[in-house]
């Protein structure tokens, strides 16, 4: 029977750590340094309070910037969609006019007396076209 040491085995190494682990270690080390530093309780609390306030301000700034970015992107996409819908409507109208002209023969160009698309569609439904 083969000995345990004689059998092949596989070593699986996982690469852990990186920047996240470094930042956590730095934060924990900074916290311990603050707690072990030779300061009075009042000075330490004031220093911690200032640090927390700075972090809060930075987080609020980041949230505001993210909101501003999302709002700007939303407005940009909304304008783009609106422009594309308008262009599609105009193309549809042009196609409808061209089809109407091809069906009925040459007529005068559309002018201010041309009925809007909604009314033309309603009339076509009423007449059964």
Image: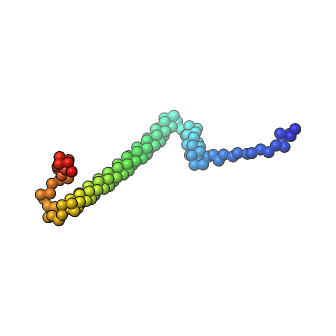
92 and 31: which one is in front? 92
Q: Give above or below for 126 relative to 80.
A: above
At 23% from the left and 57% from the top, the residue drawn is 96
How many dots with numbers? 0
Q: Give above or below for 66 relative to 36.
A: below
Q: Is residue 46 left or right of residue 3?
A: left
Visible residue check, residue 122:
no
Q: Give above or below for 105 relative to 66.
A: below
Coordinates of residue 108 in the picture (x, y in percent): 14, 64
Q: Is residue 103 left or right of residue 70?
A: left
Coordinates of residue 5 in the picture (x, y in percent): 83, 42
Q: Give above or below for 43 relative to 20.
A: above
58 and 49: which one is in front? 58
72 and 114: which one is in front? 114
The residue at the far left in this view is: 113
Asked which colour scheme the image uses, the reply is rainbow
Visible residue check, residue 77:
yes
Q: Place residue 7 in its image quadrant.
A: top right
Coordinates of residue 74 in the picture (x, y in percent): 35, 49
The residue at the far top in this view is: 41
Coordinates of residue 1 in the picture (x, y in percent): 87, 38
At 86% from the left and 39% from the top, the residue drawn is 3
Q: Is residue 117 left or right of residue 25?
A: left
At 20% from the left and 53% from the top, the residue drawn is 117
70 and 120: which one is in front? 120
């Amino acid at each position: 029977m083969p000995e345990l040491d004689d059998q092949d085995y596989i070593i699986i190494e996982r690469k852990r750590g990186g920047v996240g682990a470094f930042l956590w270690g730095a934060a924990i080390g900074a916290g311990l340094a603050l707690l072990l530093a030779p300061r009075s309780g009042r000075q330490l609390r004031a220093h911690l309070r200032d640090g927390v306030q700075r972090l809060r301000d930075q987080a609020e700034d980041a949230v505001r910037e993210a909101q501003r970015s999302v709002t700007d992107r939303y407005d940009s996409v909304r304008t783009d969609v609106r422009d594309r819908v308008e262009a599609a409507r105009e193309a549809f109208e042009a196609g409808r006019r061209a089809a109407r002209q091809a069906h009925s023969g040459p007529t005068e160009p559309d002018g201010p007396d041309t009925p809007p698309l909604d009314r033309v569609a309603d009339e076509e439904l009423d007449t059964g076209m």
